[in-house]
Image (cartoon, helix red, strand yellow):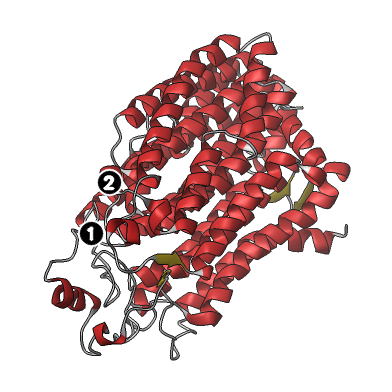
């Protein structure tokens, strides 16, 4: 591979999202925009005599036909989007005869394709690098600024796949919320800036640049969490900023200490934060300073990864952000932050031995898992349930890293990919459920499979994947982590302590999901409803694609097998 090709492949994952953000910022899509297509459509067309008058909105039509008020706003103050005229009052979606939504609610076909270009560029760059990096070793560009090893390539593939699904689901969710043109452009601008920041964090060879990129994700996603501008969403955004900024400040202090130890060891200023150089010369670093720096980094980047004790931002931010943003934050942001922590771990393992970092990670994993299991048992909100499930899975990833054997580390990487795909489907489906029922409270959602079969089945399968059931990839990854823990010389006690907590979380999620999916529907003939609902093809495609990809990884890794094993060696510091 030539230097020009390498430079292009390492630059594209950052440059393509930035160019897309610039295109949205320039307002190049301001022309006449087609009326957004609703995510839900009537399974049977209503009688003509009950069609809405052209001048009535969906809410007014519902009041005229049913004499009732629309359902309450979603938790957090999300406005109710209004039902389709002549359908059941709880049925969502814009009316066929109602005036079009505000221009820009969906950026049209051109805008939808533009939004898919940057995740496709990230995925294509990762695929191209996956062909050469495992066999020929890491590649660099711009001196020591960008570097891609096997771990970087694997994370690029995960970021690209998850972001492709989330960006494909974005227009349908914006249409449901009837977003105006300016807000829609701001949403797309921030989402692609978010992708650029995550790609920069994955590709950074310098620990200082890594810290800047992860801090950039905090700044960008704060505006996305508060996208709806309700009181609850703004409060969640501020909580996210305050807690994650505190964590990032701790990580900055740890980075400064690493730089101090490197300079004291005689490492040149230009490479004092280059993590491959630090790993190679870790034996000369001051042990006491390195130990303190590692503890601060575990706390700091652990906050962004959803690990205790700085985890409190996660359920609020995930429950208030738009569904595709929640999918990106849970599916890849947590993993990218944890991968940043792993870069410091390789330095600490070389300087102090593996025991210190493994003990910190095992302790954080068990505390986080215990909190997640307890909160899941008492949870009554669907999106917050998925957020606490993210804490559970990140604790399992940290636990596998603490075990540290080749099998455990390979299973950790497979788990990162499977969790990202399954959680993206679950969050995007939960956004459709929120629009359909007007609430995310578990107790008020019943009979999803009877009402909207495709949506109910996709959400149910995504939860089954998150529960670690076959054929999805989280089944072999969890099996690999627990098998490695029980056969390793160290880590068996942590895995044994984690098992009952995992079972409690499993039972809590399974019972609550079954309540939402099963039972008679509220819109279909079984419940006296007049018209069923079906999920539109554009909204269903990302959900089914994510499930198929997760199942394919669970059956066989195929050409990714060598990449997985090589990336596991990078995590282990070898």
Q: Is residue 351 left or right of residue 54?
A: right
Count numbered badges in the picture: 2
Q: Is residue 80 above or below residue 270?
A: below
- Residue at 48% x, 76% y is 24
Q: Which residue is mark 2?
A: 441
Q: Looking at the rendering, in which quadrant would you find the N terminus? A: bottom right
Residue 92 appears in view: yes
- Name which quarter of the figure residue 205 lies in: top right
> In the rendered structure, which disc, 2 or 1, sits on the residue that comes first in sequence?
1
Query: Residue 47 appears at what percent x and percent y?
Result: 31, 82
Say above or below: 274 vs 33: above
Label 2 Cα crowd, 10 Å radius (few <14 / some 14-19 / many 20+): some
Q: Residues within 10 Å of mark 1 (few under 14, many from 20)?
A: some
Image spot of residue 167 (x, y percent): 52, 64
Residue under circle 1?
230
Along the line of sight, which residue is nearer the eye, 209 or 26? Answer: 26
Q: Is residue 138 left or right of residue 100?
A: right
Task: Identify the residue shown where x is 67% and y is 21%.
Answer: 404
Nearer to us in this view, 145 or 193: 193
């Amino acid at each position: 591979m030539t230097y020009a090709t390498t430079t292009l492949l390492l630059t594209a994952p950052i440059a393509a999202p930035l160019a897309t953000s610039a295109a949205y910022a320039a307002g190049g899509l301001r022309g006449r925009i087609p009326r957004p297509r609703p995510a839900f459509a009537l399974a049977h067309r209503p009688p003509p005599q009950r069609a809405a008058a052209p001048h009535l909105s969906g809410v007014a039509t519902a009041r005229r036909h049913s004499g009732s008020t629309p359902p309450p706003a979603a938790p957090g103050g999300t406005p109710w989007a209004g039902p389709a005229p002549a359908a059941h009052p709880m049925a969502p979606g814009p009316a066929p005869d109602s005036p079009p939504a505000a221009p820009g609610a969906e950026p049209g076909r051109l805008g939808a394709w533009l939004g898919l270009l940057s995740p496709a560029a990230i995925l294509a760059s990762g695929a191209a690098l996956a062909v050469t990096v495992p066999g020929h070793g890491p590649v660099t560009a711009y001196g020591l600024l960008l570097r891609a090893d096997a771990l970087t390539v694997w994370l690029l593939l995960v970021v690209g796949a998850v972001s492709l699904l989330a960006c494909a689901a974005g227009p349908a969710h914006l249409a449901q919320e009837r977003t105006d043109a300016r807000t829609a452009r701001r949403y797309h601008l921030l989402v692609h800036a978010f992708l650029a920041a995550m790609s920069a964090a994955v590709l950074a060879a310098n620990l200082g640049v890594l810290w800047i990129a992860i801090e950039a994700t905090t700044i960008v996603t704060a505006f996305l969490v508060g996208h709806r501008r309700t009181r609850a969403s703004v409060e969640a955004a501020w909580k996210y900023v305050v807690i994650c900024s505190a964590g990032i400040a701790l990580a900055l202090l740890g980075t400064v200490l690493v730089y101090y130890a490197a300079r004291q060891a005689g490492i040149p200023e230009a490479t004092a934060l280059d993590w491959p150089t630090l790993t190679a010369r870790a034996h000369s670093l001051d042990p006491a300073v390195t130990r303190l720096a590692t503890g601060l980094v575990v706390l700091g980047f652990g906050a962004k990864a959803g690990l205790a004790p700085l985890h409190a931002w996660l359920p609020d931010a995930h429950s208030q952000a738009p569904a595709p943003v929640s999918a990106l934050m849970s599916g890849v942001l947590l993993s990218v932050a944890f991968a940043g922590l792993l870069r410091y771990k390789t330095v600490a393992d070389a300087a102090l031995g593996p025991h210190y970092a493994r003990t910190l990670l095992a302790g954080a994993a068990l505390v986080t898992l215990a909190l997640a299991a307890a909160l899941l048992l008492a949870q009554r909100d669907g999106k917050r349930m998925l957020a606490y499930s993210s804490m559970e899975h990140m604790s399992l990833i940290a636990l596998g890293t603490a075990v540290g054997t080749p099998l455990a580390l390979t299973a950790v990487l497979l788990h990162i990919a499977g969790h990202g795909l399954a959680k993206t489907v679950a969050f995007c489906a939960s956004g459709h459920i929120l629009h359909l029922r007007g609430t995310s409270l578990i107790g008020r959602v019943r009979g999803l499979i009877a009402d909207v079969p495709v949506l109910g089945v996709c959400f149910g399968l995504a939860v089954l994947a998150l529960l670690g059931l076959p054929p999805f990839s989280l089944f072999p990854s969890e099996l690999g982590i627990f098998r490695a823990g029980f056969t390793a010389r160290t880590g068996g006690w942590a895995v044994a302590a984690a098992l009952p907590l995992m079972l409690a979380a499993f039972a809590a999620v399974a019972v609550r999901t079954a309540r939402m999916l099963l039972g008679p529907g509220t819109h279909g003939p079984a419940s006296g409803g007049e018209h069923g609902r079906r999920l539109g093809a554009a909204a269903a495609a990302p959900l089914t694609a994510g499930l198929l990809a997760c199942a394919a990884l669970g059956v066989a890794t195929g050409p990714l097998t060598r990449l997985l094993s090589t990336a596991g060696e990078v995590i282990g510091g070898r």
